[in-house]
Image (cartoon, grey):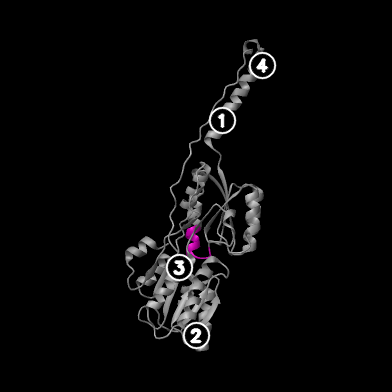
């Protein structure tokens, strides 16, 4: 997918006009009337001043559990640092890895009358109704991190990673290794999420077209312990494998724990290729040490893009790009540098 960039923001200048009230018969007004007029004028001045200062913009932010992964922690931190009172926002946060709980939170934010609903959806499906409710209430919706299956008219913009491209980049790297055979343990993220669908889709296509073998394909729900249990189960079964394709770094770490326990070598030139996603700094350090082989970047820093979009809308401008794709890459253990770790590690 061609990378799209944030369009030049259009700004509009807000001009506050003060209109004086007068009458040709003002000299005939009584002292009380004059006092009342003075009081009313002062009240008008105060209201205009308040409008000039601007009220805080109310945003309701729905995200996945920040403890889900290092990526999610970085994403949540980025949002909290941007959407503060100092930056002109009154922000409320809701977290869940379950779509129905996120939808309930969205309905609550709509009832509370937020100005903007910022959404990183747990699942791509099921959002049309609640987004229509938000639109009917005059609430603007901005997607971040993850896409959803909904009509584009229901949201203002989408600032996301290209999860399908992440998967394709990783799979192309796998092909470049030219292994004699590909026997893959596939550890999936939370089923139905955009990240899982994108990273799984690319591998499924390669398995079908290249004749690779999926030793197992199971969800570990982004969790290291569950990933370790899955890999341990495969080891106990005696079935051979030479690639672990984990859809995030935490699951890759859990898989490696199982390999280490069984004294199975992994990394560059070893028995098992280890692949992860997200580019946690500790994961990139594993690449630098050549204990892992590949890590796909998923850029969590989306808050500044959202802030610019809100400012554009607030000033009466037009957001010209509906979808903004984050710039991302993949890292190979044989070419990664310390500078890469320092620059891209989250």
Pointer 3: residues within 10 angstroms few (<14), some, or many (20+)?
many
Q: Main secondary structure of the magenta part?
A: helix
Residue 203 at what x, y percent from top left? 48, 75
Question: What is the secondary structure assignment of the residue under circle 3?
Answer: helix
Identify the residue position indicated by label 1 in the image: 48
Label 3 to label 4: alpha-carbon separation:
72 Å
Residue that carries the numbered disc 2 in the rendered image: 235
Q: CA distance from mark 1 to mark 3?
A: 50 Å
The residue beneath circle 4 is 33
Q: Is residue 255 above or below residue 110?
A: below
Q: Determine if residue 261 is in view.
A: no
Q: Give the SS element for disc 4.
A: helix
The front one of 118 and 204 is: 204
Range drawn in magenta: 67-75
Q: Could you say which disc has been placed on residue 166 in the image?
A: 3
Along the polypeptide, which appears first: circle 3 or circle 2?
3
Q: Which mark sits nearer the N-terminus, 1 or 4?
A: 4
Closer to us: 2 or 264: 2
Q: Nearer the viewer, mark 4 or mark 2?
A: 4
* Closer mark to the observer between disc 3 and disc 4: 3
Label 4: few (<14), some (14–19) or many (≥20) C-alpha neighbours in 10 Å: few
């Amino acid at each position: 997918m061609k990378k799209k960039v944030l369009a030049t923001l259009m700004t509009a200048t807000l001009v506050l006009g003060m209109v004086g009230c007068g009458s040709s018969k003002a000299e005939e007004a009584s002292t009380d009337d004059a006092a009342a007029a003075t009081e009313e004028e002062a009240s008008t001045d105060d209201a205009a001043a308040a409008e000039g200062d601007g009220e805080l913009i109310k945003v309701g932010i729905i995200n996945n559990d920040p403890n889900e992964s290092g990526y999610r922690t970085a994403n949540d931190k980025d949002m909290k640092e941007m959407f503060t009172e100092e930056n002109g926002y009154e922000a409320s946060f809701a977290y869940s890895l379950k779509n129905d709980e996120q939808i309930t939170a969205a309905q609550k934010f709509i009832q509370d009358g937020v100005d903007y609903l910022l959404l990183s959806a747990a699942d791509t499906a099921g959002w049309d109704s609640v987004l229509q409710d938000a639109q009917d209430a005059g609430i603007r919706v901005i997607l971040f991190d993850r896409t959803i299956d909904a009509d584009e008219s229901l949201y203002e913009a989408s600032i996301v990673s290209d999860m399908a491209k992440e998967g394709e980049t990783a799979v192309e790297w796998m092909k470049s290794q030219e292994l004699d055979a590909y026997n893959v343990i596939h550890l999936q993220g939370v089923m139905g999420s955009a990240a899982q669908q994108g990273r799984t889709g690319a591998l499924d296509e390669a398995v079908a077209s290249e004749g690779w073998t999926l030793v197992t394909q199971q969800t570990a729900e982004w969790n290291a312990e569950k990933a370790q249990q899955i890999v341990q189960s495969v080891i106990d079964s005696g079935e051979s494998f030479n690639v672990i394709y984990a859809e995030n770094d935490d699951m890759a770490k859990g898989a490696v724990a199982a390999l280490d326990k069984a004294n199975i070598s992994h990394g560059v030139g070893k028995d098992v290729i280890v692949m992860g996603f997200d580019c946690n700094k500790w994961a990139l350090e594993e690449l630098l040490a050549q204990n892992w082989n590949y890590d796909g970047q998923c850029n969590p820093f989306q808050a500044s893009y959202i802030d610019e979009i809100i400012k554009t809308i607030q000033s009466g401008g037009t957001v010209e790009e509906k979808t903004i794709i984050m710039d991302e890459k993949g890292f190979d253990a044989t070419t990664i540098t310390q500078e890469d770790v320092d620059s891209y590690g989250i």
